[in-house]
Structure formats: structure tokens, C-alpha cells
Amino acid sequence: MTMALDTPRPALTDLVGKTLSRRRRWKLGEVVFWGLTAAAPFMLPRGMLLLNEVAILALFALSLDLILGFAGIVSLGHAAFLGAGAYAAGLFALHVNADPLTGLVVAVLAAALLGFLTSFLVLRGTDLTRLMVTLGVALLLFELANSFSTITGGADGLQGISMGPLLGLFPFDLQGRTAYLYSLSVLFVLFLAARRMMASPFGLSLRAIRDNPLRASATGVAINGRIVMVYTIAAAYAGAAGALMAQTTQFVSLDVLEFHRSADLMLVVIIGGAGWLYGGIIGAILFKVLQDAISLATPQYWQFWIGLLLVVFVLGGREILHDLLARSRAALAKRISRRAP
Amino acid sequence: MTAPALQTIGLVKRFGGIVATNDVSLTIERGARHALIGPNGAGKTTLVNQLTGVLKPSEGRILLEGRDITTAKPEARVRLGMSRTFQINQLFQSMTALDMLLLVLCEQRNLGLKLWQKLDKSGDLAREAAAIAERFRLDDVIGEPIATLPYGKQRQLEIAAAFAARPRVLLLDEPAAGVPEAERRDLLATVADLPADVSVLLIEHDMDLVFRFATRITVLVNGTVITEGTPAAIATDPAVRAAYLGESLDA
């Protein structure tokens, strides 16, 4: 009896193995989505500057999703890492080297270091204390950047950044084509890494911490270490977004550290849905496109309309949208499977 | 090593002026089927929370196989070979039953910081998850979200998750609590089928389960151990009867 209990039915082992490998496999929708983002320069040659902003916001949102959606850490100060990356990249380009990729690495390391150091502040406490602590860190950083104006340029920003060509081959053009493809590539590579990490035992343990910290530690998860790790990774991601912003606009101002960056980001992740990696990207697309469309239509009052839309959306529109998406996906799958045999 | 599986020496826990655990010295032998019983409010869960590291004792020591774990963190105790279930389900609501078992198995193998590891390429993880699911009669619901499982299955998963950590000492905190009659038999059978080399401390209200399962019983009243013995001795002990009838002990 006991022997039999330890050797499961082969069919069950098989089912478990298949479930695991199927989960990791790329879905058709994912392939189509990334294909579309790569084809965008041909479809929307005039929209490159906006698309570049979308890609950067998407990366920034992906960063927040890692801590909010997976580990359940709320933050109202994620701009701290965006700003750290932006200033690091800007200063590096200004004073050391204008190569974009080297600058990107430097910015990522700088933001990761800041993330590591501040991660110890979010280890303890409830959602509310975490909101306050992250907000406080971002405010601190903003005032530091403001007062050390000899380094940061203060309110005038870092001026005179001139980036070298990407890989030494592709100069940044005024249409933003190089910028978009650069940002998209970085987003894609970091997305791949996030997808892999969140499907690993590490990713599983983050979801455990989010769901039930008491049980997580009772199953052997050393919670603090995991939080430090994911917070540092997320900060690195946000730093990369900041670097892309600094390099593709060749300008950094205090605006990257402003509170609205962090607050908007929270909305972006909530719009797209937290905890499935695509939420931040979809949210970024919707947010930016809406912002762009509305500010074109009513330049003075765009904040009013976006505010209204967000309230409606968060109060119920999100479920409707996700329901619509799920339904159209099911309909599409049905049509494809009907055609296949 | 001949040290007992789990031992407490003069354990005391005070909350302000209230003494919730009063000088409790308890010995769980290796391979034991030991039950801890006591009326409501006797301090059973407080004791479990100290054993597992959720609460810090005010005084006394806790030894796991002779090793002092009084100040060890909960996750460290799991690594040292002791895991627990919870009286009130503490499950990962957004996961499937399979995910939860995998998580425990991964942690048991120290894979928790492997950021790059693929779950389906981690040796016999799938086989072991399947084996545990089968043992705890979860094979028919393994891929389903935990939140949608019937209560009895959730209770099974509580034990399965603790068992997946490969403990040498297993603390079962009221495993049968609230389980409807129809699902009870499965649960009792899985508890009875636990491997003999795992020492079990069962904290339970359900006397039927206690007397069927335990070979040794400790009775806790108002935070104090009033007696310990075989089920037969406990069943006839007047002090125990008095405690359960709510009478004063010296009446």
C-alpha cells in the first residue's frame, strides 16, 4: 500500500509534466502581439515617437508588475528608480561615454543598487506603510536631485546630452525610428527574462508570498530574501526604462522623479491587470493612446477626460474589457480549430 | 542520535498578564502518533505557534531531534524537518493545487532562488507532485484553482502541502475541523496512511479521530499539561473528564 502511494500512476505524472511544459510554451496571441510591435515602424511610420514613449512606459509598468502583480508589494514611489536610471544614463552620456548600450548597463546597475538598498524598507509592514515608505523615498530623491543642481541641472534639467549611434551603426533619427526599435528591443529582451523568471521556482515563491505570507514561511520560503531580490530586479527594470527615456529624448529633467510618474504607473498596471506580465504593456498602450487622442481633441482638459475614463474603467470597465478580450479569443480559437481539420 | 523527535522544556508564553502556555514540557518520541487535546482556549494553537516559530516563547526551550530551535525562524524549522498544517486553511488562493505542491517541493530542494530554472525541467518534480496528489486523493483536482476546490479537498491539500516538505515531524492542527461527513472518511484514511517514520503531533478536538489515531495523548488545560498517557488511561482519567465537562479540577 505504502509502496504504491509513492509511485503514482504514469498517466498522472504525464499529465503534470504536460501541464508544466504547456504553460511555458508561447501562445499564438503572444507571437502575434510581438510580431505587430516589430512591424509597427512599417505600419505607423509617423507614430514612432509616440510608440517609443509607449514602449518605455510599458517597460516601466512591467517593472511595477513584477513587485505589485507577483510579490504583492504596492508602491507609490516607483519613479525613484526611473529617475535614478534616467539621471545615471544622462550623466554617463554627458561626462563619460555616449554609447547607448554602455549607458544602459550603467543606469540599470545604478537603479538596481538603489533598489537593493531601499528594499529593506519594504520588508516589513502593511500595504499602507509600504505606500508611504516608497512615496517617501521618491520624494527624497526628487528633492536631492533638485538641490544638487550643479550635478543634475536642477529645474533646468540635464542639457546637452548627445547620444552616439546605437551599436556604433544606427544614429538616433528625428522620426524616432531608431529610438523605437531600440526601446522595443530592450523591452522585449527584458520581457523574455521576466517571463522566464516568473515561471521559475522563484516566481512561484513570489506568488506564494503575495497570496499568503504566513503559509509561505511555513513551507520554507525565506520571505525577506525573495523580496529583496524581486525589488532589486524591478528597480533594475525601471532603471532601464529611465535610461531609454534619457537616451532617446537626450534630455533628463526633474519630471522623471515627479509623483505623477508613480501614480500614472499604478493606473497603467491596474488598467492592464496586474500579475500576468502583459498587463503593464497593454495598460501602457491604452494609457498613452488615450492620453494622446484626448490631448489632441481638448488640449486644456485632457486630464479631466482621462480622469473620468479611469474612474469608469476601474469601477467596472476593466472586467467588461477583459471579458470582451476573452470572448473574442475564444471565438477566434473556435474559428481556427474549425478550419484546421 | 536517540534524542526525541520533538521536545519542549519548561515552555512559557505570556501575553501581558495572561499565561497562555504554562511551563509545558512535552516529548514526542520518534515515529510517535501523539495527540494534544484540551478544551477550547486551552492554549493548543498558541503552543503550535511556538513550536513552528510564529510566536516566540517567553521562557523555555524547544528541541527538534536534540537541536535547539527556540529562536529559529519558521522557514528554518521547515528546512530542519518540521512542518505543519493550519487549523484554518492557509492556502495560496490564486494557485492551482499543483502549483502549491510544486512550490513546496521546490523549496524543499532549495530551488527557491533559481531564477532561471524551468519547472518542467527540474528532475522528478512532476513525478513527485503526482505521487503526493495521489496519496492525498487530489489527483482528480490537481489542475484546478485552489479557490474552487471543495472544503474537504482543501483540507487534504493543507496536509499534502505540509507533507510535501518531507518533514520528519509533522504537526497537524485540527485537520478534521469543519470537514463534512461525506469527505471525512477520505481525510481520516490519509491521516492514518502517513508513513510510520514521520513523527506526528495531532492537535484535535475530534475525540473520534484522536482515539483512533493516537498511541499517546497529552491533555492541556488552561495552558498547563494536566496529564499524559495512553488513550486507555486518558479515557478513564477523572481529571480529564472534569476538564471536558467544564468542572473545576479539584471539585
Image: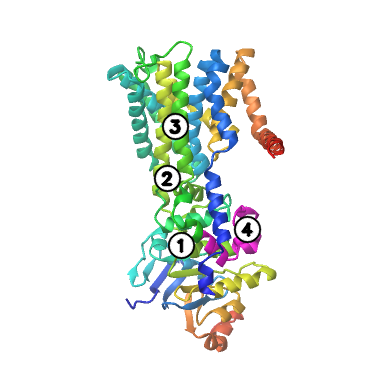
* Local secondary structure at mark 3: helix
Q: What is the distance, in whole Å, between disc 2 and disc 4 at their CAs?
A: 31 Å
Q: Residue furthest left?
A: A96
Q: Which residues are magenta?
A: B129-155
Q: Is residue B151 magenta?
A: yes
> Where is residue B51 shown, x and y percent of the image?
43, 67
> Where is residue A236 shown, x and y percent of the image?
39, 33
Whether discs 2 and 1 lie on one chain: the answer is no
**Callout 4: residue from which chain?**
B
| Corner quadrant of residue A134 | top left
First reached walking from the N terminus: tag 2 or tag 3: 3
Q: What is the distance, in whole Å, between disc 1 and disc 3 at their CAs?
A: 35 Å
Q: What is the distance, in whole Å, between disc 2 and disc 1 at their CAs?
A: 22 Å
Q: What is the distance, in whole Å, between disc 1 and disc 4 at their CAs?
A: 20 Å
Residue lying at 58% horizontally and 81% vertically, measured from the top left? B212
* Local secondary structure at mark 2: helix
Residue under label 4, please give it: B141
Residue under label 2, please give it: A227
Residue depth check, mark 1 versus mark 3: number of the one nearer the observer: 3
Residue under label 1, please give it: B165
* Local secondary structure at mark 4: helix
Relative to A56, residue B204 above or below: below
Q: Is residue A89 left or right of residue B122?
A: left
